[in-house]
Amino acid sequence: MKRTRQRPLPSGRISVPHAVTRATTIGIAGTSLLAWKANYLAAGLAACNLGLYAFIYTPLKQIHPVNTWVGAIVGAIPPLLGWAAASGEVSLNAMILPAALYFWQLPHFMALAYFCRNDYIVGGFRMLSFSDASGRRTALVSFRNCLYLLPLGFLAYDWGITSKWFALESSLLTLCMTAAALSFVQDRSTKNARRMFHASLLYLPVFMAGFLLHRLPKVEADEELLVSETQEFISDKTHKSSSWRRELKNGDQSQVRPPVAFASVAPFPFLPAPLYVSPDS
């Protein structure tokens, strides 16, 4: 292929055993480093993604067009891996970025596979555009996945990850790429496919920058936890105080020892609590 023939392995600058050895060494070292310095969840995601890329996605390129969807999963896992490394868990909030990467890759790659389809055919790769002479199915897949990107900004705002400005900005950004995809659907030319490809190149860095710029600090959950613990503490102290007063009222004063809060005498809280004696003594 013209677009890949200058890479080290196709150009012959390195041999296949050299490439396999290097890839295996880096893969094992990287996964081990994640397990050591981050957590086993992140390491497991990394190992699964390496296996998915090397042993499923890569062979599928020469077998079936479904390789594009498998490759989209491979591309969506890295932000999920980063979330797992930072938080030690995979939560619902962690799905925003992987979803954005997954749905973005399909219009991005469909456009590339369309205006480079002759190159892919020569290279022996079975893409959707290989059996789609009119390009209609390729264009519709691109347009449909652009539409799937629309709710992500609203979900990020609704789940408390970003501010409302991100919902607005990401929607406008997605509509721009969707307009390019719609033009490709209406006129399936190389020019429109290339235009959609360039729109996808612009989309991802702007989306990520907006996500970072408008993210909300994780304080709301911490504030709720603090309020809950404070209320529990006050309730516990009130219960103990009421119990002490009730016992005192019932006349069992010889065995009653008030809490330290009642025994402390300001402004000398460092003095030991006084000894209480029964009224009979």
Image (cartoon, rainbow, N blue to C red):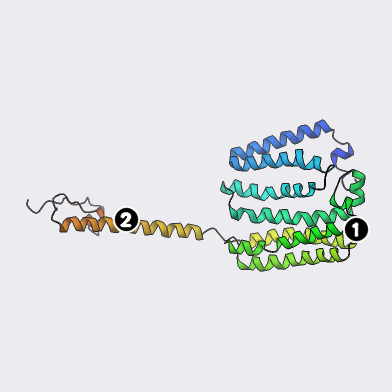
The amino acid at mark 1 is: Ser
Residue at left offset 85%, top offset 49% = 127
Residue at left offset 60%, top offset 65% = 163
Q: Secondary structure at mark 2?
A: helix
31 or 149, nearer to the observer: 149
Measuring from the top left, give residue 165's x and y in whole percent. 64, 68
Measuring from the top left, give residue 199's x and y in whole percent. 80, 62
In the picture, measured across the screen, residue 36 lies left or right of residue 194, that is: left
Measuring from the top left, give residue 266's x and y in whole percent. 24, 59
The mark tally for this picture is 2
The quarter of the picture where residue 152 lies is bottom right
3D distance between C-alphas at marks 1 and 2: 73 Å
- Characterize the local packing of mark 1: few (<14), some (14-19) or many (20 or more) Cα atoms within 10 angstroms: few
Residue at left offset 90%, top offset 44% = 123
Mark number displayed over residue 78: none
The amino acid at mark 2 is: Asp
Q: Quadrant of the N terminus?
A: top right
In the picture, measured across the screen, residue 215 lies left or right of residue 176, that is: left
Measuring from the top left, give residue 21's x and y in whole percent. 77, 32
Q: Secondary structure at mark 1?
A: loop
196 or 132, nearer to the observer: 132
The quarter of the picture where residue 153 lies is bottom right
**Where is mark 1, residue-wise?**
134
Residue at left offset 13%, top offset 55% = 251
**Where is mark 2, residue-wise?**
236
In the picture, measured across the screen, residue 156 lies left or right of residue 122, that is: left
